[in-house]
Amino acid sequence: MSEPPGAAVSVAEAPPPADTPSKELAAQRVLPLRRPGRWIATAVVLVLAAQFVHGLVSNPFYQWDRFGYWFFRPTILDGLLVTLEVTVYSAVLGLLGGILLALARLSSSPVLRAVSWVYIWALRSIPLIVVLLFLYNFSALYKTLSLGVPFGPAFFTFDESRLATDMVVAVIGLSLNEAAYAAEVVRGGILSVDQGQHEAASALGLPKRYQFRRIVFPQALRSITPNYVNQLIGLVKSTSLVFYVSLLDLFGTAQTMGATYPGDIVPLLLVVTAWYLILTSVVSVIQFYVEGYYARGATRTLPPTPLQKLRAGLTELRARIRREAAV
């Protein structure tokens, strides 16, 4: 007997729902792409790192007990203090000199542009050790320095040997060298500012000094900061050369102690290495926060801190290991 029109069809005869294939696809597990090369490279790097650490710990030639003895010795800390003083003075004077040289390079005066270019070219071409040694023996060329009328009488005369102490020679030499590199960093940062900012400031009738101090230079610092901090890291390491002008900085103190205690040369070099690593790491941390400060308003979200990056990396690593283990 046939069903009357409009009767319901039995469940067994009912057609499957239209979304059944999509449910089946959704139920399937998406397998991550296998990367055996990455895991092999990771394993090789971990093995090499483990061997390196094992060699540092187990090799008696490093004399870690003597390393601990020398690390906080007063003579080492005195040398570290000298290194910090030379670095701070040279960094400030070098940056100020770099700003003046950069402004001279960008000046409309051909004389200022030429003098600035020649200075930067010369100081970037001459090795720093040569500059330091030249300044150290400067009294052989000019025994006295004077202030007065050019090509005329002198009003004040100074004894160069009394003024040019070891600290002064080191700071002046490093500052002169640092200013040449800082000038190009600052000039690049100023040129990175959009030309429309200059035009808008000029259209408002703002003085040139105000334009540079309040509009151009703050924006240029976003580009100047990371590049100049790299220069600071190089400056921290360059202070080791002041030992050759008789200034006992961190490296010079270690050299002197190594000559007195020949058996402790390797531990002393490790002490110097550790302190330089600490100093450059502190500079890098300061760089991160300074960059974040000047990046405000230029980016929607500030970059994560190193601790946040570490936590995110560990979380991602754990999640990846779980996914690989579930396959």
Image (cartoon, rainbow, N blue to C red):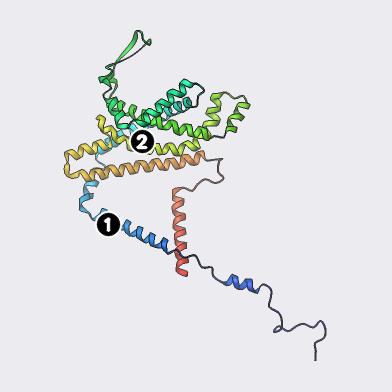
Q: Residue at x 46, y 51 (%)?
A: 309
Total numbered badges shown on the rendered structure: 2
> For the residue labelled by badge 2, is the local secondary structure a helix, a strand or a loop?
helix
How far apart in space, not on screen, are marks 1 and 2 (Cα)? 32 Å
Residue 135: x percent and y percent? 29, 25
Residue 70: x percent and y percent? 23, 43
Considering every residue shown, the one lying at the far top of the view is 153
> Is 194 placed above or below 100 here?
below
Q: What is the quadrant of residue 232 in the picture?
A: top left
> What kind of residue is marked 2?
Leu
Q: Which residue is mark 1?
A: 54
Screen quadrant of the N terminus: bottom right
Whether residue 121 is visible, yes or no, is yes
Whichever of labels 1 and 2 marks the residue nearer the N terminus, that label is 1
Q: Residue at x 34, y 30 (%)?
A: 126
Q: Nearer the viewer, residue 234 or 38?
A: 38
> What kind of residue is marked 1?
His
Residue 273: x percent and y percent? 29, 44
Instruction: Tell me: 115 left or right of 201.
Output: left
Q: Nearer the viewer, residue 206 or 84?
A: 206
Q: Which residue is mark 2?
A: 235
Residue 259: x percent and y percent? 18, 38
> Which of the numbered marks, if any, corresponds to residue 213?
none
Classed neighbour count for the residue bearing mark 2: other residues with Cα under 10 Å, few (<14), some (14–19), many (≥20):
many
Considering every residue shown, the one lying at the far right of the view is 5
Instruction: Tell me: 6 left or right of 291.
Output: right
Q: Nearer the viewer, residue 111 or 171?
A: 111
> Is 2 placed above or below 324 here?
below
Q: Residue at x 75, y 83 (%)?
A: 9
> For the residue labelled by badge 1, is the local secondary structure a helix, a strand or a loop?
helix
Do the numbered discs 1 and 2 sit on residues whose CB atoms are within 8 Å? no
